[in-house]
Image (tube, grey):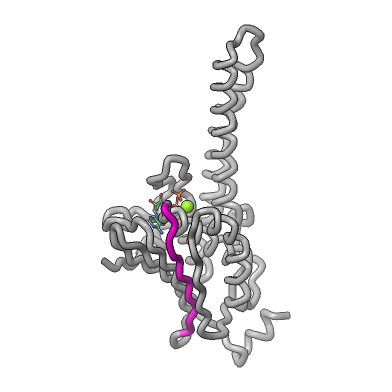
């Protein structure tokens, strides 16, 4: 089951999404405010207090997840374009997710076949890769293996993130990237939307290949830049 993701064109602009996210963060904050007000009552039982506190904390976590999944949209466009050394940028992203992988019993194997350079923004690239890896790890609740590869094929940088997790049905793959689509109890459904928008902004493509019970492969491709490109030096400056 291989699906070309064609939703990239349909995505709203980044700033539209940013507006809807700030709206989204306001919901949990409003709920928290309400429960904190309820806590200000001397007649509450211990149980009631605990209940109000636990809901407030849950909502706080939710607001935090929304902001985390969504972090790079704070900036409206790809304004800090640089030449990215993908090997170096992947290493950085892996360092960030390592503790989460260890905690989840997931073994990460990395294969770098080539030195590959693209034009993009490092933070946005990290955000894509981190969201992909986070989802892959969350798809392996019993632990498992995650393989990340970097290759250069023709003039494309090809990154594969392959997990041995729960996989997805055709319908689930179709819904990827739709805002707020989540199958997780505490999910935000923003991670893949962020990935799709950022890949689009960096003129890339995404492919998804998934099988229920076996695992999922996300492939992202970006046009490479070469040292010989006249604009290589220009961008590096
Ligand atoms: P969230 O992770 O908060 O649920 P995402 O947008 O990151 O939101 O992902 C949306 C949904 O896509 C997930 O809830 C999950 O059902 C599915 N998904 C994404 N990546 C994978 C994966 N590697 N394996 C299985 N399902 C996945
Ligand atoms: Mg996610």
Answer above or below: position of 37 versus 157: above
Q: Residue at x 27, y 54 (%)?
A: 171
List x then y, in percent, for residue 117: 58, 81
Q: Quadrant of the C terminus?
A: bottom right
View extreme (bottom): residue: 228
Residue 165 lies, with reference to residue 57, above or below; the image says: below
Magenta range is 142-152
- Looking at the image, the residue that sits furthest to the right is 237
Q: Position of residue 159 (x, y in %)?
A: 47, 74
Check residue 143 for magenta coloring.
yes
- Total labels drawn: 0
Q: Quadrant of residue 1?
A: bottom left
Residue 237 visible (yes or no):
yes
53 up-or-down from 116: above or below: above
Residue at image coords 63%, 17%: 39
Residue 212, quarter of picture: bottom left
- Residue at position x 55%, y 16% in the image: 48
Magenta stretch, main secondary structure class: strand
Q: Within the image, what quadrant is residue 52 found in?
A: top right
Q: Is residue 60 magenta?
A: no
* Left or right: 178, with 90 as reference point: left
Q: Is residue 154 above or below residue 146?
A: below
Q: In this orientation, does residue 203 appear?
A: no
36 or 202: nearer the eye? 36
Across and down, in percent, residue 2 comes to 29, 68
């Amino acid at each position: 089951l291989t699906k070309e993701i064609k939703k990239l064109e349909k995505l709203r602009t980044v700033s539209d999404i940013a507006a809807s996210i700030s709206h989204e963060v306001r919901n949990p904050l409003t709920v928290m405010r309400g429960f904190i007000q309820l806590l200000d009552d001397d007649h509450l039982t211990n149980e009631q207090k605990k209940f109000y506190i636990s809901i407030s904390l849950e909502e706080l976590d939710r607001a935090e997840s929304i902001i985390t999944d969504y972090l790079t949209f704070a900036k409206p466009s790809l304004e800090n374009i640089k030449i990215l050394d993908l090997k170096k940028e992947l290493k950085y992203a892996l360092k960030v997710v390592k503790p989460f992988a260890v905690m989840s019993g997931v073994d990460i194997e990395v294969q770098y076949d080539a030195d590959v350079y693209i034009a993009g923004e490092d933070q946005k690239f990290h955000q894509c890769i981190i969201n992909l890896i986070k989802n892959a790890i969350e798809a392996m609740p019993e632990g498992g293996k995650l393989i990340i590869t970097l290759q250069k094929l023709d003039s494309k940088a090809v990154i594969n993130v392959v997990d041995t997790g729960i996989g997805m049905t055709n319908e689930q793959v179709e819904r990827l990237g739709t805002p707020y689509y989540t199958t997780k109890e505490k999910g935000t459904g923003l991670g893949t939307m962020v990935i799709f928008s950022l890949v689009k902004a960096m003129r890339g493509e995404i492919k998804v290949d998934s099988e229920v019970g076996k695992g999922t492969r996300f492939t992202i491709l970006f046009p490479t830049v070469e040292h010989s490109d006249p604009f290589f030096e220009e961008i590096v400056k």
